[in-house]
Structures are given as structure tokens and as C-alpha cells.
Image (cartoon, rainbow, N blue to C red):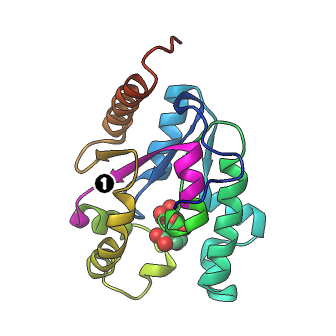
């Protein structure tokens, strides 16, 4: 049986919109624009972790190790998901934590931003801020990651393919998917 989070499920239209998916798919950039489009506040999980720890993600991995990073990430996700409605760009590994996954299930509409792996591999090469890719061929590393993570990302409420399109297109595709989701789940509610 799935454990309920302390607060329990909340109505679909009151939920935070949480973007999930691999690093490099554009969760942060699209999330910021989506928040503006919907008139909601925006938070980026990685930035919140960095400000809570007063260290960069790279330094947390290097100095404290991945397990400390993951523990901090789970605390930050809990605080954000128990707070007011927002658009939340989650770090690519956040949804793998079972407690975070339960909170996302009960308190967020989750959107898996999916793009083909070649596209993602090209995008992540532009910056060297991702410890899990350091010193590795990006396509090989992302392919291995996808194998483990795609079954988890696939549990998201919505999947939006963002391969090839501009960020503005991704925003519109997500808005459309959200509207259909809200209408299907709470059809009688009028804004
Ligand atoms: C990670 C993704 C990163 C960051 C950290 C670990 C992951 O976030 O949290 O480097 O495990 O996929 P982005 O998905 O925002 O790049």
C-alpha cells in the first residue's frame, strides 16, 4: 500500500506544478516562463538547495557526497511541496526519493518534460555544472540514467515532448496539457 503524506492529497487545481525529467531538458528555463504565464511563483529545486546549504550543487557533491546532496534535496522538496502553490523545477534525481515521490503524488501535478537523448546530450555540453556527467560521455551517461529513471518519470501525471521546439512552444504545450488535465479531473470548477 502507498503511504499517504501527512497532509494527504489536495485538489488538482490547488496543486503545485512540478516539472520532472532529465537534466538538460529545460525544466528551469521553461519553468520560469511557465510560472510567469500562469501568474504563479517559481522555485528551482537546485537553487533552493544551494541557498539552504550556502554551497553550489557541484561543491556539495564534491565535499559532502551525493548522499548528503540527496538528503538535502529531499528536505527542500518537502518544504516547497508543503508550501503554497507554485511552479517547481525539480532536479533530475529528486523524484527518485520515495518520500518526495509521495509528496509529488499528493500535492503536485507532475509534468515529465521529455526530449530525445541526443538533443539533451547536446544541451548539457554547454555547461559543466553537473557532477553526474563530469568526465563522462554525455550521451552514454544520459542513456544509462534514462534506463533507470524513465519508468519513474513515466509515473508523472502528464508527459510533454519538448524535443526540437523553442522554450515558448514547450510552455504552450504544457499549458494545454494542464488545462486538459484540470478539465478532466475537476470539470465542474469555474475559474
Ligand atoms: C541531478 C540533476 C541536477 C542536480 C544534480 C543531480 C540528477 O539538476 O540536481 O546535478 O541526479 O539528475 P537538473 O536536473 O536541474 O540539472
| Count of numbered tags | 1
The residue lying toward the viewer, choosing from 93 and 122, is 93
Q: Residues within 10 Å of mark 1 (few under 14, many from 20)?
A: many
The residue lying toward the viewer, choosing from 113 and 139, is 113
User: Height in image: 128 above or below 176?
Assistant: below
Relative to 101, is 160 on the left or the right? left
The response on whether ligand 1 sits within 8 Å of label 1 is no
**Which residue is label 1 attached to?**
114
Magenta residues? 101-118
- Which quadrant holds residue 169? top left
Q: Position of residue 172 (x, y in %)?
A: 35, 31
Farthest residue, direction front? 1
Relative to 21, is 12 on the left or the right? right
Relative to 138, is 102 on the left or the right? right
Measuring 29% from the left and 47% from the top, which residue is drawn there? 162
Measuring 72% from the left and 43% from the top, which residue is drawn there? 83
Q: Is residue 108 in the magenta section?
A: yes
Q: Is residue 169 in the magenta section?
A: no
> Would residue 9 be seen by someone viewing this image from the given angle?
yes
Q: Position of residue 63 (x, y in %)?
A: 69, 88
Q: Position of residue 53 (x, y in %)?
A: 76, 70
- Which quadrant holds residue 136? bottom left
Relative to 156, is 159 on the left or the right? left
Say what secondary structure mark 1 lies in: strand
Measuring 34% from the left and 39% from the top, which residue is drawn there? 170
Measuring 24% from the left and 51% from the top, which residue is drawn there? 163
> Would residue 129 be seen by someone viewing this image from the given angle?
no
Q: Position of residue 21 (x, y in %)?
A: 40, 58
User: Height in image: 106 above or below 184?
Assistant: below
Amino acid at each position: 500500500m502507498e503511504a499517504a503524506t501527512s497532509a494527504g492529497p489536495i485538489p488538482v487545481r490547488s496543486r503545485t506544478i512540478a516539472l520532472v525529467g532529465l537534466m538538460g531538458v529545460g525544466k528551469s528555463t521553461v519553468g520560469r516562463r511557465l510560472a510567469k504565464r500562469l501568474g504563479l511563483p517559481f522555485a528551482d529545486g537546485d537553487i533552493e538547495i544551494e541557498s539552504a546549504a550556502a554551497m553550489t550543487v557541484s561543491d556539495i557533491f564534491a565535499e559532502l557526497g551525493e548522499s548528503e546532496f540527496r538528503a538535502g534535496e529531499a528536505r527542500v522538496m518537502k518544504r516547497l511541496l508543503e508550501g503554497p502553490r507554485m511552479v517547481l523545477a525539480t532536479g533530475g534525481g529528486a523524484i527518485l526519493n520515495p518520500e518526495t515521490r509521495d509528496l509529488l503524488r499528493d500535492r503536485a501535478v507532475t509534468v515529465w518534460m521529455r526530449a530525445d537523448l541526443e538533443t539533451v546530450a547536446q544541451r548539457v555540453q554547454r555547461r559543466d555544472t553537473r557532477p553526474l556527467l563530469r568526465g563522462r560521455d554525455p550521451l552514454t551517461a544520459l542513456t544509462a540514467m534514462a534506463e533507470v529513471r524513465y519508468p519513474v518519470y513515466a509515473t508523472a501525471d502528464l508527459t510533454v515532448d519538448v524535443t526540437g521546439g523553442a522554450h515558448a512552444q514547450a510552455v504552450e504545450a504544457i499549458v494545454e496539457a494542464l488545462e486538459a488535465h484540470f478539465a478532466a479531473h475537476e470539470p465542474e470548477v469555474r475559474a
